[in-house]
Amino acid sequence: MGECRDQDSGRCADRHTGLPADMEELATAAPLEGVISFTVLRLESPVSYWVRLLQDPEDERRSQQQFLRLMMAVSKEFSKSEARLPVREVRRGEMVAVLGREGVVRRGRVERLVQRSELGGVTSLESVEVFAVDSGQLEVVPPCQVFALPASLATSVFPPSAIRLV
């Protein structure tokens, strides 16, 4: 990555702050300092990246292994159709499992509910906008592709991997 010429002058104070993707209470986190090692998951813009932070350069292997264990656990859990329990009531901010574009089930946080108005003033849920906490991607899926997330896959067991670095 190199060094930022403007970091000391204060002209790009926000560029050196990493925030966990799913923890809004940490939005006031202190800027990261020193050498920061990370794996880029997705490029959002020239100054905004979704990354997986590494404690030290040797930590990359450990981080990848933990991520693979999580993906295997999710795959194993949702490989059977009877495990794909629909969410009874979808709420903003709730952690769920979501069947993504590639047919892969991921963990996600509900960001927005898109309602559709029908005749007679009745509304129904048309789609759900979900933030994938392990890849940093936003997906819009129909409600039938949103499932209950078991406690064994909660963020307390497997912390979120994606962090936005600006």
Image (tube, helix red, strand yellow):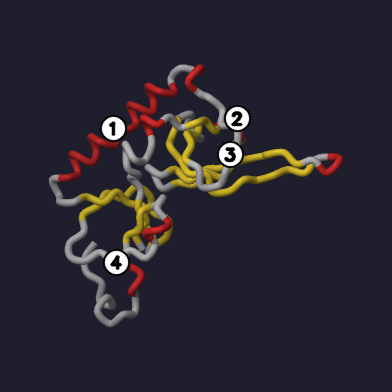
Q: Which one is in front in this view, the residue at disc 2 or the one at disc 3?
A: 3
- The residue beneath circle 4 is 30
- The residue beneath circle 2 is 144
In the displayed structure image, the side of residue 137 where residue 15 appears, left or right = left
Which three-letter amino acid code belongs to the residue tagged 3?
Val
- The residue beneath circle 1 is 68
Which three-letter amino acid code belongs to the residue tagged 4?
Ala
**Residue most extreme to the bottom:** 9
Looking at the image, is 161 positioned above or below residue 105? below
- Classify mark 1: helix, strand or loop: helix
- Residue count near mark 3 (Cα–Cα under 10 Å), binned few <14, some 14–19, many ≥20: some
The N terminus, quarter of image = bottom left
Ranked by sequence position, the earlier of labels 4 and 2 is 4
Residue 113 in which image quadrant: top right
| Residue at (50, 31) in percent of width and height | 148
- The residue beneath circle 3 is 90
Distance (Cα) linking label 4 and label 3? 33 Å
| Residue at (34, 79) in percent of width and height | 11
